[in-house]
Image (spheres, helix red, strand yellow):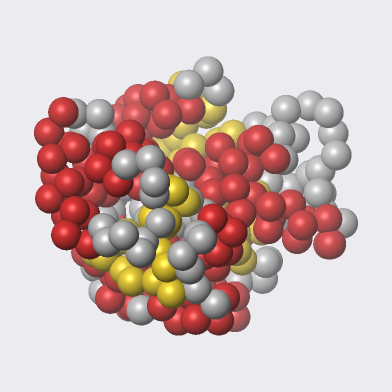
Amino acid sequence: MRDRPIGVFDSGLGGLTVVQALADLLPSEDVVYLGDTARYPYGERSEDEVARFAEAIAHELVARDCKLVVIACNSATAAALDRLRSRIDVPVVGVVEPGLRAAAKATRTGRALVIATKLTAHSGVYERVASQIGIEVSTLACPGFVELVEEGRAEDPATVAIVRERLAPRLTSRIDTLVLGCTHFPLLARPLSEVVGRRTTLVSSADEVAFEVHDLLDRLGWRRTSSARGRLTLLTTGERARFALLAGRFLGARRAEVRTCRITALEGGGEAAGAAAG
Ligand code: DGL
C-alpha cells in the first residue's frame, strides 16, 4: 500500500489547491489528480448527477491503484461523501469538515461566512457540520466564480467588481472569517482579500485536508517514507493542452505529466492520450 499513489479529484483545477498542500506535507507521496473538466461546473448540477460522477471517478482512481481517495471538491463532498465511503474499497476523505475545523481555529467571533457553489450552499452541508463543530455559519452561493478560475480570469481587473457585488451585502461586522467552501476559490484569493479587507481571515480546507491524510496514512502504516520526491500525474476529461497550461500556471516550477482520460462508466473508453507538461 505504502508505494501506491493518493488519488485526488475535482471538477477541474480547484482541487490542485489541495494537491499543493499534500505536496508540502507529504512530499514523497505520488499523487494522481483527476480534473473532470468535461463536466464542470459541478455546482450548477443536481446532487444525484454529481454523486454519479464522483462515484465513477473514485472507481477510476481505485482502478489506477490509489490507496486513498480525496474528494477535493466541496460540491462532490456534499453530494457523495457518504455514498463513496460505503461503496469504495479504500478510505475516502472529503473537504467540508476539514475546512470548518480550520474556520473554528481562526474565528474569534464564532461566526463565519461560507462562500460556495450553488449545489454546496443549497445542500446545507456546511450548516449541518458546523453545528457539530460548534461554530455558526451562513452560506452564500457564488455562481460564476468557478468559471472565473477555469477561464483564467482570476487576475482580471473586472473580477474584483464581480466578487464585491456578490459578497459586500453579506459582510457584517460579526463575521471575521471567510470560509472558501469551494476548492477553486483559493485561486481567487487576491480579489477576495481586496473585497473583505484585512480584518477578515480567509480560510481554505487544503492544509487541514493534508493533515487528515497524513494522520490517516500514519494510522494505517501506509505513509511513504522515501526521500525521493513523489510523482504528480494530472488527468483531465477535457482538453489536455488547456488544462496543462492553466495547471502549469498554478503549479509553477513543479513538473507533472498531463494526460486525457475518459471515465468509462460515464462515456465509454479508456485513456486517450499522454504527454509531459508542467
Ligand atoms: N471545486 C469545486 C468545489 O469545491 C467546484 C465545483 C464546480 O465545478 O462547480 O465545489
Q: Nearer the viewer, residue 271 or 182?
A: 182
Residue 188: which quarter of the image?
A: top left
Which residue does the image show at 83% across and 62% down from the upper left? Answer: 220
Quarter of the image with the N terminus in it? bottom right
Residue 45 in the figure: left or right of residue 255: left
Q: Residue furthest top?
A: 253
Residue 106 pos. (x, y %) = 54, 55
Which residue does the image show at 59% across and 48% down from the upper left? Answer: 207
Q: How many marks?
A: 0
Residue 115 pos. (x, y %) = 32, 59
Q: Nearer the viewer, residue 25 or 231?
A: 25
Which residue does the image show at 67% across and 67% down from the upper left? Answer: 91
Residue 253 in the figure: left or right of residue 74: right
Can you see residue 235?
Answer: yes
Specify the quarter for ligand 1: bottom left
Can you see residue 78?
Answer: no
Residue 32 pos. (x, y %) = 57, 44
Which residue does the image show at 69% across and 52% down from the upper left? Answer: 211
Residue 24: which quarter of the image?
A: top right
